[in-house]
Image (cartoon, rainbow, N blue to C red):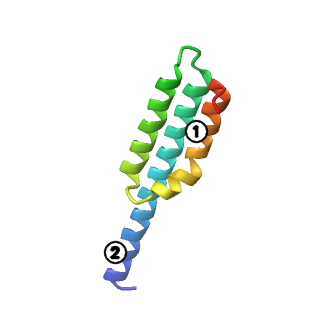
Amino acid sequence: MNGRDFAGKVRISSEKDEESRKIRRLQIMISMVMSVIAQDPNLTVEEAAELAAGAKSAALAMFPDKEFAYDILYKPRLQRLMNERFRLQ
């Protein structure tokens, strides 16, 4: 293996590590938002909607071209939680 091959593999590995960190950060953020929505007794439906919108904005800032993925992975979970918590339909 020459130097360029090694450097390329290190770069790819570093990119994968960064991607993994961003995914984990997103998962933690969504988990925290869902916990607040589920557990804060003083939270209004408007505040919960703002939290959900902020989570989407943050997710799209981390992953700019992944709105479709967000919409199929996280949006339904947040909507279901909001419906259960606030008895929305």
Q: Residue at x 56, y 27 (%)?
A: 37
Disc ID at residue 7: 2
30 left or right, relative to 64: right
Viewer-side residue, 34 vs 89: 89
- Image coordinates for residue 59, horizontal then vertical, percent: 43, 47
Amino acid type at circle 1 is Leu
Amino acid type at circle 2 is Ala
- Image coordinates for residue 74, horizontal then vertical, percent: 56, 46
Q: Is residue 13 above or below residue 51?
A: below
Viewer-side residue, 31 vs 66: 66
Q: Residue at x 61, y 45 (%)?
A: 76
- Image coordinates for residue 48, horizontal then vertical, percent: 51, 27
Q: Secondary structure at mark 2?
A: helix
- Quadrant in which the N terminus is drawn: bottom left
- Image coordinates for residue 34, horizontal then vertical, percent: 57, 33
**Mark earlier in primary sequence (2, 1):** 2
Viewer-side residue, 33 vs 47: 47
Farthest residue to the front: give it. 89
- Quadrant in which the C terminus is drawn: top right
Q: Is residue 33 above or below residue 61?
A: above
Q: Is residue 26 above or below residue 82?
A: below
- Closer to the camera: disc 2 or disc 1? 1
**Which residue does the numbered mark 1 point to in the structure image?**
78
Asked if disc 2 and disc 1 are in contact, CB closer than 8 Å, the reply is: no
Q: Residue at x 62, y 26 (%)?
A: 38
Q: CA distance from mark 2 to mark 1?
A: 41 Å
Residue 40, image quadrant = top right
Q: Residue at x 40, y 43 (%)?
A: 58
